Amino acid sequence: MAGPELDHAHYLRLTFRVAERSAAEGSHPFGCILVSSDGKVLIEQGNAYHPHHDMTGHAERVLATRASMAWRPAELAGTTLYTSAEPCAMCAGAAYWAGIGRVVYGLSEQRLKGITGDHPENPTLDLPCRTVFASGQRAVEVIGPLLEDEAAAIHETFWAGR
């Protein structure tokens, strides 16, 4: 990836704030941002489960849709999707199809599944995003889990009360 080295911890903590806001607004505690190769935050997205109970309203999927409508894949190849939790198979697919070049995540799908159990609002797919990306025809760099305990704390608090 071209451009300066990005501070992954800084951007992940921004996603944690987005996730906390999402939870405070009554939705699920997931958040993500899209960052350009020069460190500019291009898009911020919280979970979109509410108000219509959209089970596909995951933050990463919605962000990928918005990004793909604003930029072409060649432009998105230099971007990084920072996300509070590892993208599920659907979200990884959306990031792949949009053309996003790198994903950095906090909480792993496996650990999220341990936190949420079989909660009907989050039937976690324990499928690593690396597996989804490896099935594609272009490379997507994946970094994570990072700051996993911080990322997990948001979910432990939220799902315990549901």
Image (cartoon, grey):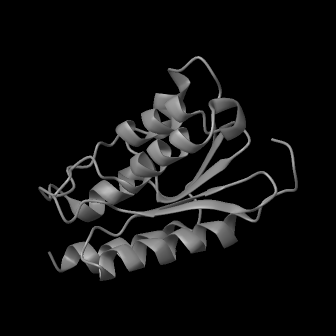
Q: Is residue 43 left or right of residue 40?
A: left
Q: Is residue 138 left or right of residue 32?
A: right
State the residue in front, 101 or 151.
101
Q: Residue at x 54, y 45 (%)?
A: 67
Residue 82 against residue 153 in the figure, above or below = above
Residue 31 against residue 162 in the figure, above or below = above
Residue 86 seen: yes
Q: Is residue 87 left or right of residue 27?
A: right
Give x and y (percent) for residue 154.
Answer: 38, 76
Give x and y (percent) for residue 36.
Answer: 73, 53
Give x and y (percent) for residue 71.
Answer: 62, 40
Give x and y (percent) for residue 40.
Answer: 73, 62
Q: Residue at x 28, y 64 (%)?
A: 115
Residue 19 picture quarter: bottom left
Quarter holding the N terminus is top right
Q: Residue at x 38, y 44 (%)?
A: 88
Residue 125 picture quarter: top left
Residue 108 against residue 156 in the figure, above or below = above
Q: Residue at x 14, y 75 (%)?
A: 162
